Image (cartoon, grey):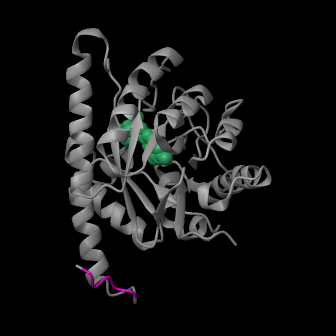
Amino acid sequence: MPDPLILDCAGHRLSLDRPRIMGILNVTPDSFSDGGRYAQMQAAIEHARAMVTAGADLIDVGGESTRPGAEPVTLEEELRRVIPVLSALRAEVVVPLSIDTSKPEVMRAAVDAGAGLINDVNGLRAPGAMAAVMASGAAVCIMHMRGTPRSMQQQPQYEDVVAEVSAFLAGQAAALRAHGVAAQRIVLDPGFGFGKTFEHNVALFRQLPDLVALGYPVLVGVSRKSMIGKILGGRPVTDRPLGSVVAAVLAARAGAHILRVHDVAETADALAIRAALDPIVDDHDTTA
Ligand code: HH2
């Protein structure tokens, strides 16, 4: 059985004995083009530093928006957005860096620039993506998505969303293992909001323990997503932090190992309270 307690991010061994926080660093709209390049780069580094100070255990750098309907970004543009940031962050922060990409070329360049985790919302379905992971020493997050960001919210349908998502993730993990990728390098993610209706997202969240039972670390990304807004009566994205933090704590209680969030400080506080006071667990963290 895989050991879920360590994630090997290209030699940087991250213990998953408690829920870990992945801070989101988006370098998307018009990033680093010409004039504003240096200023935006500095802002990105400052934001990453602040997230680490606030309790982030990983920083996820993304150069392509995956919002529903988002237009794809060219390879050159994505490389231009993320590689300088990763190279700079490598010297600036001590936590492992993650690259949020589906392109094998970006995966390879990002690992060379210092990324220790490849976070693929496309679940390694692109030709060459599996090979890029195998050839690297990096960990990988395999996320489930139905379709592409452009098309994924056009009436997604499943017979049994939990079973289908689990089968896809288990199959991709097995393919990696068969090619010699260690279990300690693999993370699974059901992909909230990626080709799923609100009801699909709720079913997947409520049944997170089924995914955890596959034996690999599980990453949950619900921060500020529409499912949080919908539960809260149509809240705009700016008013979703508290709902997002509560959902992160619930995911941790269900056994999720990594929480991908925008609001790092608030999530860290909430997890600390949970670790100290949750009456349902019997292994309280008393180190605070
Ligand atoms: N969600 C987004 C992007 N990357 N990666 C993983 N593993 N899991 C997720 O749920 C996930 C992800 C959503 O992306 P986007 O809508 O572009 O916004 P943001 O990156 O600010 O969350």
Residue at the extreme right of the image, as rendered: 178
Where does the image place residue 198, in percent across and percent down from the top left?
46, 49
Q: Within the image, what quadrant is residue 56 found in?
A: bottom left
Q: Residue at x 23, y 10 (%)?
A: 35
Q: Residue at x 31, y 18 (%)?
A: 32
Asked whether 167 or 59 is in front, the reply is 59
Please state if 34 lies on the left or on the right of 188 as rendered. left
Quarter of the image with the N terminus in it: bottom right
Where does the image place residue 180, in percent across and percent down from the top left?
75, 53
Residue at the extreme top of the image, as rendered: 34
Where does the image place residue 226, in percent across and percent down from the top left?
36, 44
Where does the image place residue 174, in percent across and percent down from the top left?
75, 55
Asked whether 68 or 99 is in front, the reply is 99
What span is in magenta?
A: 283-287
Q: Residue at x 59, y 40 (%)?
A: 156
Q: Residue at x 62, y 44 (%)?
A: 157
In this view, 166 is above or below 72: below
Q: Within the image, what quadrant is residue 91 found in?
A: top left
Residue at the extreme bottom of the image, as rendered: 282
Residue 240 seen anywhere in this rendered image of the structure? no
